[in-house]
Structure formats: C-alpha cells, structure tokens
Image: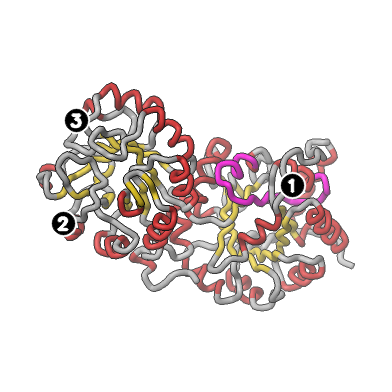
Amino acid sequence: MRRVTEAGAPTVLASILSAKRRRLEAGEIGGARPAGPRPDGERFESALAGPGPRVIAEIKHRSPSAGTILEGAGSRVADVARAYRRGGASAISVVVEQDFFGGDPAWIPVAKGASGLPVLMKDFVVDERQLDQAAALGADAVLLVVAALGDEELRRLHAAASARGLAVLVEAHDAAEAERAAAAGARLVGVNARDLRTFRVDLDAMARLGRSLPSGAIRVAESGIRDARDVRRLCGEGYGAFLVGESLLRSGDPARALRRLVGLGSTEVKVCGLTRAEDVRSAVSLGVDWVGLNLSPLSPRRVSLEAAGALAEAAAGAGVVLVVAGNAPEEVARAVERVRPAAVQLHEPPSPAATAPGVPLWQAVRVGRDDLDAAALWPGERFVLDAARPGQAGGTGTTFDWSVAASRRWGRPVVLAGGLTPGNVAEAVRRVRPACVDVASGVESAPGVKDAARMEAFVAAVRGVPDPQTDEGGAG
C-alpha cells in the first residue's frame, strides 16, 4: 500500500502540505457542520456530463509558478463568477489555499451566490475537517490530489466527502496515480498537465494519459489549456471537461475568452426593452451580456424609475443599459443614481445634458435618418446602429442595409440593432462582425413581453457563429 508523506512528495507540494497541516494543528480550519442546504455533488457531476466540452472556470489569485494572476482577487470574485456564468461555464473552481495561492475560503459562497453555478473548493485536502469546511461554505465538490495522499487516506477522504454530499474530483499526474484514483472509486478523474516537481506543463503527456483512463469516469483536463485548439485536441483523446483559470483571468474579458475557448462565437448579446423580472432572470440565465431598460417616453416598452431599479436588481450577472430619448436631464440623473447602470444608451443626437458623468455612453445612430458622416464623429464608447422609425426610440422590428454597417470604419465597437430575430441574427453577425447584437421585438410575444424560447434560440444562433480566427470549427 502506497503512503505519501511530505518528505517523499515533490518539494513545492511538500511545502504546501506542511503549511496546510500547520493551519489544521493551529485550529484555523474549523469543523463546523453545514447550516445551509446539503452540498449538491450530483448537480456538479451532472454539469460536467453534458454534451460538448464543459468548463470548470477557475478563480485564482496567484500560484507558485505563475505569480499573481488576478489582482485584487478578493474584491473581484463576484464579478468574475458572473462573467464565467455569461461565458457558459458549467461550474466554478475557487482556489482557497492561503499560503501559496493567496486564496480565501470565504470566496466560495460569494462565487456561488453571484453565479448560481455549482462550485468546487480547490484546496489541498488532508483532513475531514476541510470537508466539513467545504460543506459549511456551500461548496458542491472538493479536490483530492493523489500525490498528496496515501491509498488509505485517499479512499477514506473520498468516502467521507461522498457521505457529505460532495462530489470529488480526484487529480492524477501520471498513469500510476490514475490507477490509484480509480481504485479509490473516483467518478471524476482530473489529469493535471503540470509536473509538481518542476511545475512545467506537458499537454502531450496529458493527451496520452487520457486514452487510458477508465471509460466510465468523467475525464477532466487540468492546467496549461490555452485555446480552442488545445480543447479540440484533448476532446479527441477522451476528455469531456476542462478546468481552466489562468488564460481566462489574464484575458481581460473572461466571458469572451471562455466562449472562444470552446469554439463558440464571442459576439455579445443585449436583450432590450425588458419590462418583467421573470424575463430579466431568463435572459441572465441564458448568458446574455447586457439587459436594456427603456426609460424613453417614445417607447412602448417604457418602464418607470421604480420598476427599472427592481429590474436591475434581477439582472445581477449582466450589465444594465438604460435607454433614454426625450427624457429630461434631471430624470436621467435620477435614473443613473437609482439604477447604477453599466452604460446609458442615447437614442437621439448627442446632448451633454442627457449623459451622466462617469457612466459610459452608447450612442445610437439611426440609419436612414442621421447623417452617417457626421455621426461617425459623435462621442460615445459604442455606436448602436439601429433602423430609424419616426417617433420611436428603438425596438422598431425593422432591419436596415447591413452593408452600411460593414463598409464603414466606425472607430469604436458597434452594437447592431434593428429587426434582428433568431432567424436572421447569425447572418447579421457573419456579415457585420459587430461587438454586440441588440434584440427587442425579435424575441417578444407582445411589446415588452419576452418569449423565453425565442431568447434561447437567439442566443444559440449568435453563439453558433465562430469568431473569424476559429471558423474552422468548434471545440467539439
């Protein structure tokens, strides 16, 4: 029977384990039983068993090999978790090890609450008290590292975690460790491409090992996965799930990077003219990037300031854009103060009085009505290109000639609007390549009443158009 001790483990791992045992001996890791709902390990496993590549997206402050990865991690956990949800993550991994990775167990409930996804507590588990800690914090799964444990410890901790309702991702680095993981009863087997002795990454070794893993196990590829080519290659070797953190966190836009990683189109989606909280929640659950709340008296989808505030609260996980046209400056100022939007979208020619200091401006350009040469010089972080209809602020249900959008250099990101539907949006994305597509009437059953199935079809159509550099095909 194999027994692994700190003395026999690779140097970095040995130091991590020693630090972990010191914290346990000092009583810093409590043994409190969970006060909330039982961990949902079945949900975690099911999330990784679906079709196509499934991603466990990781939140990690730093590592011994890479240094600082996420600056100010403690204050950014919720935002990153929401971005992962938008990007299509199946689950979230939170690295909580404190001494070498700068983690914090308190990040687990924050990540879970912000994303609504199942969460893996990623730590170096050597004691059942850590399992109690994971359950008490709301984690749904834990990591067991084969190299850190003897055979009996591995079996005991695996059984103890399962008894608490926790799923168990068992991490191996070579064929011998994979056999030990299988012997311990692992249903989730992670293969780490990083050699714990050198911390170098070897994807070739990971690919070879993938072919030999038990057929009944969910195979998770860990470490060193950078792009869709890596994912496609490893899918071909039997891996169905991927644990990825550093490349997403360093990208600057984790949601976009995650979509690209699995071969999906990264064009953003904005659903505008929302009037009901249930529609907002449905849109967010589908991974839309933006929700638009219309305050314009010119719109049949206008909502009151009080309603806008409540809808914005339901939109946690997506950016809120306030749409204004014909509104008094003081009304816009009150709305910004109440809603705290990510942007204000002005659906009329620029007016300093209608903007809010410190809030990004999305400037609408009404194709067919505005002088496009003059409009190209207007201020704004983004241009929203929309079809014009007299007396109406967006949501016209009318398309315009997309070549107008595609043939010009606008000098800033373009949001394409006007008559988009689940049936035509893919072609619009291919022809214009906008940063974002904006839909209102195209997913409605009545003005302001969204249809969940149409929204789902719209998002799927957008995601189905790969970015130009990945047009050769998705990840699986």
The segment highlighted magenta reads 109-129
**Pointer 2 or 1: first along the chain:** 1
- Callout 1–callout 3 Cβ contact below 8 Å: no
**Neighbour tally class for label 1: few under 14, some 14-19, many 20 plus, Cα within 10 Å:** some
At a point 59% along the width and 76% down the height, the residue shown is 237
Closest to the observer, 97 or 93: 93
**Neighbour tally class for label 2: few under 14, some 14-19, many 20 plus, Cα within 10 Å:** few
Q: Identify the amino acid type marked 2.
A: Val
**Pointer 3 or 2: first along the chain:** 3
On the image, numbered disc 1 is attached to which residue? 38
Closest to the observer, 412 or 114: 114
On the image, numbered disc 3 is attached to which residue? 351
- The secondary element bearing badge 3 is classed as loop
Q: Where residue 442 sits in the image (x, y, percent)?
A: 31, 54
- Identify whether 361 is placed above or below 232: above
Q: Where residue 468 sits in the image (x, y, percent)?
A: 33, 65
Q: CA distance from mark 3 to mark 2?
A: 24 Å
Q: Where residue 187 sits in the image (x, y, percent)?
A: 73, 66
Q: Nearer the viewer, mark 1 or mark 3?
A: 1
At a point 56% along the width and 72% down the height, the residue shown is 234
- The secondary element bearing badge 1 is classed as loop
| Residue ranking furthest to the right | 1
